[in-house]
Image (tube, rainbow, N blue to C red):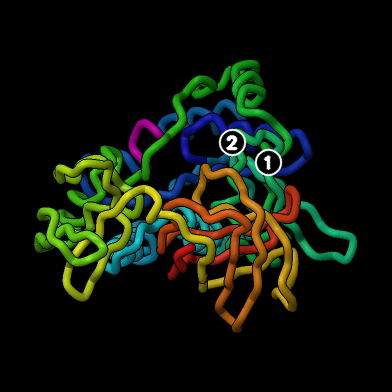
Amino acid sequence: MSGGVDSSVAVLLMQREGFDCSGVTMKLFSGETKAEKTCCSLDDVSDARSAACRLGIPYYVFDYTAQFDENVIRRFVQVYEEGGTPNPCIDCNRYLKFGSLYDRARLLGCDTIATGHYARVEQGPEGRWLLKKGLDTAKDQSYVLYMLTQEQLAHTRFPLGDMTKEAARALAAEQGLLNARKRDSQDICFVPDGDYAAFIRQYTGQDYPPGDFVDETGRVLGRHWGAIGYTIGQRRGLGVSAEKPLYVCAKRREDNAIVLGGNERLFSATLLANDLNFIAVPRLTEPVRCRARVRYRQAEQWATAEQTDEDVLRVTFDQPQRAITPGQAVVLYDGDTVIGGGTIYQTEEQ
């Protein structure tokens, strides 16, 4: 229970199905900085405890600060240092909610983990567990859950998968839950102000050296203030004057240069991904036609996906896609069913 309305309503819906529920909030920080207070803040704990009391269930706060630091924050920093742009919510789901918390639940004798994610779990006709989109397309969170295993899916419930957000809020208000109209969290929890570069500098205690902005010919266009502060597709905050808008097209670790170019240089037709996880099938035995998403809120696009090695996925889009970014996830869909996905590590120009 995060303290928000979704996880509170998830408890209510599980109770209505006859489940004996306990509420858990995951403590992810131990310090007193602004970021640390935001992630599992006292207000969130108070709201979650209030909802648990209203619903008549036991409530616990489990300390996972060490696991969160190792598996989410350090990975976040490492990917930025390597020139990518990570999605820490995926790592948090993989290693914390459906890793550490899942293991704790099993030890405590709990049969099922339920969360407030907008997604659905179903068992296919051949017995394989399937992950499907939430029916509220505006809130669907299947993209950040593609890493779930068959074992985890068998013991996971997403009670809000068939609901809209407004229906969830209305149900919470009807039950007198104080968080019925609580604002949704928008930012990465440990970077509440969105300044990723400042967070990384504070976390590592390191300074990241400035370098050159260059064009594709190598001509120097200006100076950047540390490569961790920029991401593929970025236009704002470059401080470079030009006749046409310039965007970050590539980040070169070998000489600490950032390549700038026009919008047309951001499009790629093909990507390679690793760290693969398949849900609908054990693996891809042949090329498949599917729709693919390369960032959380992007509309899915038609593509052909092929598993070229044990841990290499090649995805070729019918139409080149803008700003495909290493470190982000590519997730494959067959209709509303998640086939699987992986972490993007390379793109090829159109």
192 w.r.t. 320: above or below:
above
273 w.r.t. 64: above or below:
below
- How many other residues sit within 10 Å of disc 2, few (<14), some (14-19) or many (≥20)? some
Q: Position of residue 145 (x, y in %)?
A: 58, 54
Q: State left or right for residue 75 relative to residue 119.
A: left
Magenta segment: 40-44
Looking at the image, can residue 168 be seen? yes
Looking at the image, can residue 205 be seen? no
- Residue that protrudes farthest toward the right in the picture: 125
Q: Residue at x 21, y 41 (%)?
A: 243
User: Disc 1, disc 2: CB below 8 Å?
Assistant: yes
242 w.r.t. 210: above or below:
above
Q: Position of residue 170 (x, y in %)?
A: 63, 18
Residues at marks 1 and 2, CA–CA distance in whole angstroms: 7 Å
Which residue is labeled 2 in the image?
Answer: 139
Q: Which corner quadrant of the image does residue 83 belong to?
A: bottom left
10 w.r.t. 79: above or below:
above
- Residue that protrudes farthest toward the bottom in the picture: 309
* SS state under label 2: loop
The kind of residue tagged 2 is Lys
Q: State left or right for residue 243 relative to residue 26.
A: left
Question: Considering depth in this image, is 270 or 253 the residue closer to the camera?
Answer: 270
Q: Which mark is residue 145?
A: none
Q: Which corner quadrant of the image does residue 151 belong to?
A: bottom right
Which residue is labeled 1 in the image?
Answer: 134
Q: Position of residue 35 (x, y in %)?
A: 26, 43
Question: Considering depth in this image, is 304 or 156 the residue closer to the camera?
Answer: 304
- How many other residues sit within 10 Å of disc 1, few (<14), some (14-19) or many (≥20)? many
Magenta region, main secondary structure:
helix
The kind of residue tagged 1 is Gly
Q: Residue at x 25, y 69 (%)?
A: 252
N-terminal label among 1 and 2: 1
